[in-house]
Amino acid sequence: MPELPARKAGIVACSGEEIAEGTVSRLAALKVLHETRRGATVTICLPLFLAGGEGDRTFARIHPTITVDGCELRCAARGTEIYSGKPAASLVVTDLLSRRGLERPEGRRSLNEAGRRAVELTADRLAELVDDVLGRSGGDTVDLPEAEPASKVPAVTCACGSGIPLSTITIEGRPVELVALPLIFQSFRDAVRVGDATLGRELLETVKIYNAVATGDEPGYTEALLREYQAFCAGRAS
Amino acid sequence: MSETSRLTVVVPCSGIGKALGSVSREAAYELCDNLRPASTRLVALSKLVLGEEEARRLVRRSPVVTIDGCKKMCAASLVRHSDGVVSREVAVLDVFRRHSHLKPDGIAELNEDGRELARVLATEIADDLASLLSDGGIHA
């Protein structure tokens, strides 16, 4: 069983390649991901919600997600809500600049000075939103370690390097990959759930939110989940 | 059909976390802004995620070149999902293998090797555009 990853905020940028504000959204997201809130944030390429697999589509259900859009089309916010889950917060670069009375950026390939200022402003606001959704005090400088390497925590990987935990457990003699299992176990353990009568059913229902489980397979899943949960609570790797 | 008589749509991936994604985007800009500005049109992949009608119309009516930075091939997949036909499907990794002396690095800002790889890739596509338009064939 992999170690539990820290709770992180998900960031989804539109990256709109056609306009400078799309470039601002991407660069602001990268600044937060790699600099100001490094270790507290993860990302996923927006198109993976459609082009990827089921694991990619669980992103916003697992991570409280903040979307960053370059324009009023709000592709990232609307796409995330349609295909993954409702964002915890949303940010639109054009709105932000308008509210601050700042000049619109130019240069989708290489931003002008106004564009670089827009990146700073957007990144600052994005960092505030990260603090909000993670319950951190405003203005904290987060200095957390980078995400666990893939070799340590198996993950549903994508081009953006995001990592949703993916575990393999044995169900009725065969290996089965399940998305988000450590997070589910953690939430049950946090709720001090032990071996009561409804535990197996509730574990299964939660697992089914993120994973497809055929009706006929449910008894085997329930048995395996109870076994793995006991091992998890005992701190043993399966 | 002359190259300028028909628009070619270029769709790069929206890779945000890897250098090859940045190469795909940079190649698309090089192609659409510098090499073939009159005959190409860049379409943002995020619009296809949303199903924006103008973007869907463009990829359905025009030859489409997709440039993807990883094996997930999001750009090609979403063009097809939008009922478009991919006339040329480019994987940056394939081009990188042919020019392995160029080592792209950097995400927010590509290094010089990354920019050169993008230029090479864009030039290859530009050189092929005329035949792409004339026969409408698949050049995967």
Image: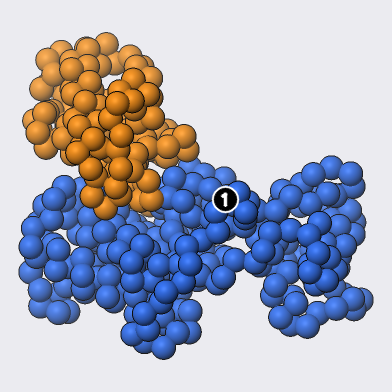
Tell me what residue is drawn at x 35 percent, y 51 percent: B16
Q: Residue furthest bottom?
A: A137
Which of the pair A27/A219 is nearer the observer?
A27
Chain letter for orange, please.
B
Which of the pair B104/B86 is nearer the observer?
B104
- Measured from the top left, where is residue A154 in percent x and y? 63, 51
Indicate the secondary structure of the residue bearing disc 1: loop
**Would you identify the image quadrant in which residue A163 lies?**
bottom right
Chain letter for blue, please.
A
**Would you identify the image quadrant in which residue A71 lies?**
bottom left
Tell me what residue is drawn at x 74 percent, y 58 percent: A1
Pointer 1: what residue? A150
Q: Quadrant of the N terminus of chain B?
A: top left
Tell me what residue is drawn at x 76 percent, y 47 percent: A176
In the image, A110: left or right of A75?
A: left
Tell me what residue is drawn at x 21 percent, y 66 percent: A119
Vertical placement of A73 versus B128: above or below?
below
Vertical placement of A194 versus A49: above or below?
below
- Measured from the top left, where is residue B53 in percent x and y? 31, 46
Q: Amino acid at mark 1?
A: Ala
Count all numbered tags in the image, as a single digit. Answer: 1
Vertical placement of A70 versus B41: above or below?
below
Task: Please indicate, yes or no, whether residue B129 appears anywhere in the rendered image.
Answer: no
